[in-house]
């Protein structure tokens, strides 16, 4: 009788972890222009933000400041990990 209780508890913990993990992907990206972001200090700069310009499209409207961006403008502005490693 102990084994089924432990299995139920383990299943409950696993389900709770899966639900908590899914909630992080639903967070909205902050809307900041690239010009405004370039004036922020590094401690206040978000890791990922979206440009509010409706005419720009992916990858040019999503900015990542951690060096992993697919936007070539971000590589020039904040640097990229794989620059020069052709």
Image (cartoon, rainbow, N blue to C red):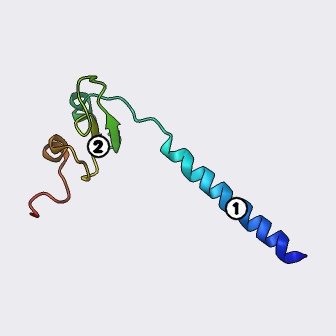
What residue would you read off at disc 2? 42
Residue lying at the far top of the rendered structure: 54
Q: Position of residue 26 (x, y in %)?
A: 50, 40
Q: Residue 60, position in %: x, y?
A: 22, 36
Q: Quadrant of the C terminus?
A: bottom left
Near mark 2 (Cα within 10 A), the count class, few <14, some 14-19 or many ≥20, is few
Mark earlier in primary sequence (1, 2): 1
Camera-side residue of 50 and 54: 54
Mark 1 crowd level (few <14, some 14–19, many ≥20, 10 Å Cα): few
Q: For numbered disc 2, what is the local secondary structure?
A: loop
Q: To which quarter of the image does residue 62 belong? A: top left
Q: CA distance from mark 1 to mark 2?
A: 37 Å
Q: Nearer the viewer, mark 1 or mark 2?
A: 1
Q: Residue at x 28, y 22 (%)?
A: 54
Residue 14 position in % (x across, y down): 66, 62
User: 28 or 66: which is nearer to us?
Assistant: 28
Q: Residue at x 49, y 39 (%)?
A: 27
The circle drawn on residue 64 is none
Locate residue 37, reporting x and y percent.
26, 33
Q: Secondary structure at mark 1?
A: helix
Left or right relative to 4: residue 55: left
* Residue under the point 77% across and 65% down: 9
- Determine which residue is flagged by label 1: 13
Label 1–label 2 contact, CB within 8 A: no
* Above or below: residue 52 compared with residue 70: above
Q: Residue at x 29, y 43 (%)?
A: 42
């Amino acid at each position: 009788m102990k084994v089924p209780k432990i299995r139920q508890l383990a299943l409950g913990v696993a389900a709770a972890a899966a639900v908590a993990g899914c909630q992080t992907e639903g967070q909205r990206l902050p809307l900041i222009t690239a010009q405004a972001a370039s004036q922020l200090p590094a401690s206040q700069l978000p890791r990922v933000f979206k440009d509010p310009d409706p005419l720009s499209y992916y990858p040019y409207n999503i900015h990542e400041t951690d060096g992993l961006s697919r936007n070539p403008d971000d590589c020039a502005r904040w640097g990229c990990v794989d620059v020069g490693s052709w």
